[in-house]
Amino acid sequence: MEEIGFLGLGIMGKAMSMNLLRHGFKLTVWNRTLSRCDELVEHGATIGESPAAVIKKCKYTIAMLSDPAAALSVVFEEGGVLEQICAGKGYIDMSTVDAETSSKISEAITSKGGNFLEAPVSGSKKPAEDGQLVILAAGEKALYEEILPAFDVLGKKSFYLGQVGNGAKMKLVVNMIMGSMMNAFSEGLVLTEKSGLNPQTLLDVLDLGAIANPMFKMKGPSMVQSSYSPAFPLKHQQKDMRLALALGDENSVPMPVAAAANEAFKKARSMGLGDLDFSAVHETLKATKS
Ligand SMILES: NC(=O)C1=CN([C@@H]2O[C@H](COP(=O)(O)OP(=O)(O)OC[C@H]3O[C@@H](n4cnc5c(N)ncnc54)[C@H](OP(=O)(O)O)[C@@H]3O)[C@@H](O)[C@H]2O)C=CC1
Ligand SMILES: O=CCCC(=O)O
C-alpha cells in the first residue's frame, strides 16, 4: 500500500502507528510535541514537519487527536491539513469527536477536492497495540475501501455506517454507556467494601454472571488497588460524556444516568485526576461515600 501519514502520537496514535510499522506499512508521522515522534523514527517512520507537509507527501493520512478543538486546529490552522489536501488524497480522522466537528472537517476537505472518512474506534491502548480495535467508519465509501488494508491491521472489525456523523454518533453512544457502567461498577465496589465484603469476591461473582464483561475484568483488580495508569484518560471520557449528552439534548433523549456519570467525571477532573485512567472516577465515589 502507499505510504500513510499519521497525525497525533498520543496513547492511541503511538500504539496504532507502531502496529502499522510492524505490519510493513511505510509511515510519515507528525505530533504537536515533536519529540514524541522519536520512538516511531527508531522503528522506521519518517517525520513530517507539519500536518500540511505530511498531507503533501502521503496519499492517505490518518489523524488520532484528543478532542474537537485539536481535530479542528490540525485541519484549519497555519501549516494544517487544508493547505495541501487536494483531489486524489484521503484524510481519515479516527479521533472521538462530535458529528458537527466531523462534518465541518469533511466539508472543508471535500471543498478542496479531497476525500474524507471519520473512523473513531472502540477499544483502548492494548487493543490498539494488538490490532484489535473496532472501527466505526462513515463518509466517502471509496476511501473506506481503499484504506481497508490499514483498517484490517488496526482492527478486528470495521463497520461502514454511511454518511459523515454516523461514526461519531455511534462512538459517543458506546462511550456514554461505558462511562455510565464504570460509575455503577465503582459504586458497587465501594458498597461492597463499606458493607464489609471482599471486593475481589465481588469481581469473581460478577465475572461468572450475566453482567460479566471485559471492562470489569480488566479494570476491577487495579481499581481495588487504587491504581490508575492511563489507558483511556479520564479527561477524554468526560469529553465523550459531554458530547453524548449534547447529542441526547439535540434528540430530546433524557439521559439521567449518563448525566450523573458525567458529574462524577467532572468531579474527578476537579480533583486533578484527568490524566489518569477513566477508572480513577472510583476515587471520587470513595471520597463522597467515606
Ligand atoms: N486512550 C483510549 O483508550 C482511547 C482514546 N480514544 C480517542 O482517541 C483520541 C486520542 O486519544 P489518546 O491517544 O488516548 O489521547 P492522548 O491524550 O494520549 O493524545 C492526544 C493527542 O492529541 C494531540 N493534541 C492535543 N491537542 C492538540 C492540538 N491542539 N493540536 C494538535 N495536536 C493536539 C496530542 O499532542 P501532544 O503530544 O503534543 O500533546 C496527542 O498526540 C481521543 O479522541 C480519544 O477520545 C478512542 C478510543 C480509545
Ligand atoms: O474511547 C475509548 C474507548 C476505550 C475502550 O473501548 O476500552
Image: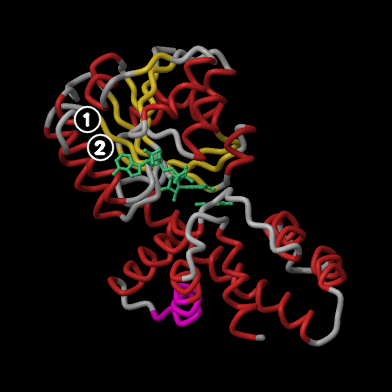
Label 1 and label 2: CA atoms lie apart by 6 Å
* Amino acid identity at mark 1: Val
Q: Secondary structure at mark 1?
A: helix
Camera-side residue of 100 and 270: 270
Q: Which residues are magenta?
A: 254-263
- Residue 255 is covered by the magenta coloring: yes
Label the magenta part by its dominant secondary structure.
helix
The answer to whether the beta carbon of the residue marked 2 is less than 8 Å from any atom of ligand 1 is: yes
Q: Identify which residue is drawn at 65% across, 78% down.
A: 286
Quadrant of the image occupied by residue 278: bottom right
Q: Is residue 55 left or right of residue 66?
A: left
> x%, y% of residue 245?
37, 71
Mark found first going from the N terminus, 1 or 2: 2
Image quadrant occupied by the C terminus: bottom right
> x%, y% of residue 198?
86, 75
Residue 145, label in figure: none
Q: Is residue 59 above or below residue 119?
A: above
Camera-side residue of 148 and 68: 68
Q: Is residue 116 left or right of residue 283?
A: left
Q: Identify which residue is drawn at 12% across, 34% down.
A: 111
Residue contact at pointers 1 and 2, CB within 8 angstroms? yes
Number of callouts in the render?
A: 2
Residue picked out by circle 2: 74
Q: Secondary structure at mark 2?
A: helix
Residue picked out by circle 1: 81
The answer to whether the beta carbon of the residue marked 1 is less than 8 Å from any atom of ligand 1 is: no
Q: Identify which residue is drawn at 62% across, 51% down.
A: 229
